[in-house]
Amino acid sequence: MSLTGRIVTVYGNMVTAEVDGSVCQNAVAYCLRSDGVKLMSEIIRIRGNLIDMQVFELTRGLMVGDVVEVTDDLLSVELGPGLIGMVYDGLQNPLVEMAAKVGNFLEPGHYLKALDRKKEWDFTPTAKVGDVLTAAENLGFVKENIFDHNIMVPFTLRGEWTVKTIAPAGKYTVEHEIATLEKDGETVSVNMIQKWPVRMPLGIYKERLLPTTPMVTKQRIIDTFFPVMLGGTYCIPGPFGAGKTVLQSNTSRYADVDLVIIAACGERAGEVVETLREFPHLSDPRTGRTLIERTIIICNTSSMPVAARESSVYTAVTLGEYYRQVGLNVLLLADSTSRWAQALREMSGRLEEIPGEEAFPAYLESSIARFYERGGIVELKNGKKASLTIGGTVSPAGGNFEEPVTQGTIKVVGAFLGLSYARSYARRFPAIDPLESWSKYKGIIDTEKVDWAHDFLKRGKTVNEMMQVVGEEGTSIEDFIVYLKSEFLDNVYLQQNSFDEVDAACPVERQKYLFELVTSVLAHEFAFTSKADARDTFFTLTDQVRNWNYTPWGSEKLAEIEKSIKETLAAKGAAK
Amino acid sequence: MNKYYTKIDSLAGNVATLKAKGVGYDELAVVEGKWGKSLAQVIRVNGDSATIQIFAGTRGVSTGDKVSFLGSSMKFSFSEDLFGRVFSGSGEARDGRGELTENMVEVGGPAVNPAIRLMPNRMIPTNIPMIDVFNTLVEGQKLPIFSIPGEPYNELLARIALQAEADVIILGGMGLKYDEYLFFKNKLEQGGAMDHTIMFIHTASDPVVECLQTPDIALTVAEQFALQGKKVLCLLTDMTNFANALKEISITMEQIPSNRGYPGDLYSQLASRYEKAVVFEDGGSITLIAVTTMPGDDVTHPVPDNTGYITEGQFYLKGGVIDPFGSLSRLKQQVNGKTRDDHRAIMDGCIQLYSKCRETREKRAMGFEMSEWDNKLLSYGDDFEKSIMSFSNNIGLFDALDQCWKLLADHFEPRETGIRSNLCEKYWVKKQA
C-alpha cells in the first residue's frame, strides 16, 4: 500500500522527495532520519515524481537520500468520547501523556494516540437490530461528563445501512466493537472511534439554519452592543497589549455554551499554562463542574514547529464540528489566526510561490473564508439543533487594520470587535472600540434602545473633539452634559473589571437591569449650576454605579446603592 | 574520519555552496583557509550540494578552502566551570582561558512541552516603583525593554540584574559596542555578581552569523541550569541586532521578504528564543529580559511589533523613565493580588489620573483656561513624576504604595480618584488639621 521515496532537498521545514507511483495531495508521509526517528509530514505539492512536504518537526539531521514513507491517509484526527478536558498539540498528540512518556521537551518523532484506549465507557444502545440508518445517525450514547455523547454511524459511510448487531448496554473501551452494519452484502464493524481528515469540513445534518440565539458572553459591551450568535462568527483584531488575551480568556470562562475549544495557535505557552492550571479548579456556574470538563485545548504555541501550527486550527475546528454533530453548542476560540496566516506565508515562501500583499500567499483570503464557514448552527438528523461558533483573534502588524489578514477576516465574519490601543492606553477594558466595532447580530436588549444609548457615545466623542479645539469654557453646558453622559456610559457599562469577582461576569438579567438603570441616568434632565457642579455629580454617579457593579446580585447593599443613585439624580433636575 | 571537500562552488554574503554527500540539515562544518578556521552551519541540502553559512563570514574564503563536516549540529559545553567566563557569539572563549569540551549539550533543541510548565507566580523585586508597583516583574517572565537608541537601557538591565537575586545571570550581547561590553563587565564585577555570571558577547565588529548564535547558546546554557533547579536571569541586548542579522542572511538566501526586508518567519524566529522563558516544576526557571531598540521610536517597526506579540508585556523606556502607558507586564496579575490589597487599585488609580493629567497638559499647551480640576491634575502629575517615576527612586514595594496614597491625599478627594471606597477608608492619608 504505502510507497517509499528518497529525500532530495531539505530546506527549513520543507523537504522534497522523489517518489515513483501515485501519491495523494495532503497525504501524510514520514521522513526517516538515519538514526531511525520518524518525522511526520504532509504532502503539500506534487510536481512530476517530486513531492514537497511540510514537516511537522525540526528537520535537523535529515539528509539527502533518507527514506520517505508515503501513506494514503490524509492528515486526520481521532474523534470519539474522551476528547473533553484534553490538551493536544496541533497534530492531536496528548501533551500531558507525552510529557509522561518523553519528558520535559517535545522530542521529534513521538506520536501518541489521541483517545485513551483503556478507559471504559458506559454505553447505552438506542438503535435496534434491523434499523436502517445513514451516516451520523445515532447507534447509542455514552456519558461523557454531563453530556450524552452520541455514538454515530461512521461519517464516511454512504447510503443506507442496516444494523446487523448492536452491543447491549455495558462498559466498553473505544476500540471495542459496538455494532456491525450491513449494506448490499458488505459488513462493517463500528466502534466508538471515528477518523476524519482535518481539511475537509465535517457536516452531516438536515439543514443549516440562520443564527438567531445570542451567545451570552457576560461581557456587557459584547452582549449589549456587539452581540454574537450561537453558530455565528466574530473576530477580535487588536494591537498587542490591547487585551485580546484577557478577553478571549474571559469568554472561554463565562460564555454560555456547552463546550469551549481553545486553539492556542502560535501564541505564548504561558497563556495555555494559565488555562491548564486554573481551569481544573474553577467551577462552571452552569453545571457546578469544573471548567476543564467543558474545555478542549489545542495548543501549538509559538516555539513549536510552524507546520503543525498551520494544521492546528483545522484540528480544532474539526473537533468542534464533531461535537456539533454530537449535539452540543460549541465555541471555538482561535488565538491567533494571524499566526496561522504567518505559517501559511512561511510555507508559501519556501515553496517559492508568487507572493501577494505583504508576502502572504494569494490564497490567504479564501483560506480564511473557508475556515470561518465551517462554523454555523444546524438541525441534525435527529431534529436537535447544535452549533459551532467561531471567534478568532487577529494580531495585525503594527495594529494596522488595513493589513491582509484583518481585511480578509472582516469580510467573512458576523461581528467585528476591534480593540483599540487608545482605549487600552487609557486602561479602559475591555478595550473594544465602541465606535469602530460592529455586529450584524441582534443582542439581548432591544436594538432601538441600544442604538439610542450608542448615540451618546458618538455625540460625546464629537463634543470631546470640539472641546479639544474650543476648550471647556467654549462648550455649552448642554454639550458638556452629553459628553459627561457618554463618559458615564463608558465607565460603568462598557468597561468591566475582569479581576473583580462580581464584575468579571455580568449575567443577562443583571445586564438588562443595569441597562435600565444607566438609561435612567442618560435620559435624566439635569439642572446644574456650573460645569464643575456637573462634573462633580457625574463623579458621584460613576462612583456609585461602579460600586453597584462590584456588589453581588440580590444583596441588600445593592438596593441601598440604587437608592443613593436615585437620590443623586433627584437632587439634580428631573427625569425626562 | 571526516571527509574533506576542497571545492566551493559559490560564495555570496556569508553563504557558501559546495558539492557534498551525506550531509545532514543543521549540521556543523569547519571551513579552513589562509585566514584561519571558522565554523559553519548547513542551512540547505539539495541533491548533491549543500549550502552552509560561515560564522566568520566569507571575506577571504577561497573556493579551494578545505571544508569538513562534523556530523552533528551545534553543541556547547555545560558545567559549573562556566561561571565568570566570557565567550564569543559562537561559543569560543573570549577571556583567553581556554575552551571547554566536557559535557557537550545540543544548542537550540526542541521546545518545552507546555503541559509541564508552571504558572509564574513569584514577584521579582527591583526597587524601581515604576516596575514594582505598576508593572511587576515576575519570575519566569519574558519581557523586552523597548527603547530608542541612546536611552539608558543597559543601565536599567544592569540594575535589574544586580537587584533580582538570581542564582545564575547569563548575558547575551548582540552587536554590542565594545565599551558597552566593558560597562556590563564592570557593573557586574562591582556588584559582586561575576561569580555567578556567564557572558556571551558578540560585538559590532564580530561576524554577523555569530550574532545569530548568541541567544541560542546563551539560552541553551540557561535552560540547562534551569533544569538543575536554578533560577536563571537571562539578559539579551540588543534583539534588534539579532533580527537584522536574520534579515541579512535571508536576503542572501534570496527569500522573499515580508515587511521592510525582514523574513516572513521573523515572528517564529523571535518566538523560539523568547519562549525559552519558563518555570519548571522543581523550581528552576528562566526569566528573560531583552532590549529591543526601536529605530526612530517606531513601535510598529517589525521587530518591536513582533516582539510585543510574543513577550509578556514590555517596559517602554522613554525620556529616561519607564513610560507608564506603553509599558505593561502581563503577568503582574499573577502576583499583585497577593502583595497588598491596595496594590491593584493604586496601580490603576494613579495611572488613570496621570493619563488625565497628560490630557490637561495638552489643553494647557493650547492656551485653554484651567479649571480647578485641571489644576489639581497638573500639580498631581508633576509630583507623580518626581516622587514615583524618576529612576533615582530606590524604594521597596510597600513604601512605594504608601507614597502613592500620600500623593493622592495631597491632591484629591477620595471619590475623585475612582478607587473603590472601602480601600480609601482603609488607606486614605488623613490631612493634618
Image (cartoon, coloured by chain):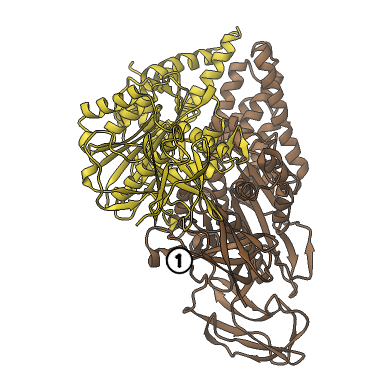
Chain colours: A brown, B yellow
Between residue A520 and residue B320, name the one nearer to us: B320
Task: Report whether B221 appears left or right of A414.
Answer: left
Image quadrant occupied by the C terminus of chain B: top left
Whether residue A118 is situated above or below residue B33 in the rendered picture:
below
Residue B406: percent from left, percent from top: 36, 22
Is residue B138 at least partly visible in the picture? no
Where in the figure is residue A354, as x and y percent of width and height? 71, 44
Give the quadrant of residue B200: top left
The quadrant of the rendering that contains the N terminus of chain B is bottom left
What is the chain letter for disc 1? A
Residue visible at 50% across and 40% down in the picture? B15
The quadrant holding residue B302 is top right
Q: Report crowding for label 1: few under 14, some 14 to 19, many 20 or more residues within 10 A (C-alpha).
A: some
Residue at the image point whose x is 63% and y is 46% from the top: A349
Q: Is residue A282 left or right of residue A367?
A: left
- A153 vs B294, nearest the viewer: B294
Q: How many marks?
A: 1
The correct choice, above or below, for B80 with respect to A72 in the image is above
Q: Amino acid at mark 1?
A: Val
Q: Is residue B141 above or below residue B380?
A: below
> What residue does disc 1 label?
A37
- Pick the residue in front: B174 or A260: B174
Whole-percent x and y of residue A105? 40, 58
Picture coordinates of residue A556, whole percent (x, y)? 51, 46
Query: Can residue A190 be seen in this snapshot?
Result: yes
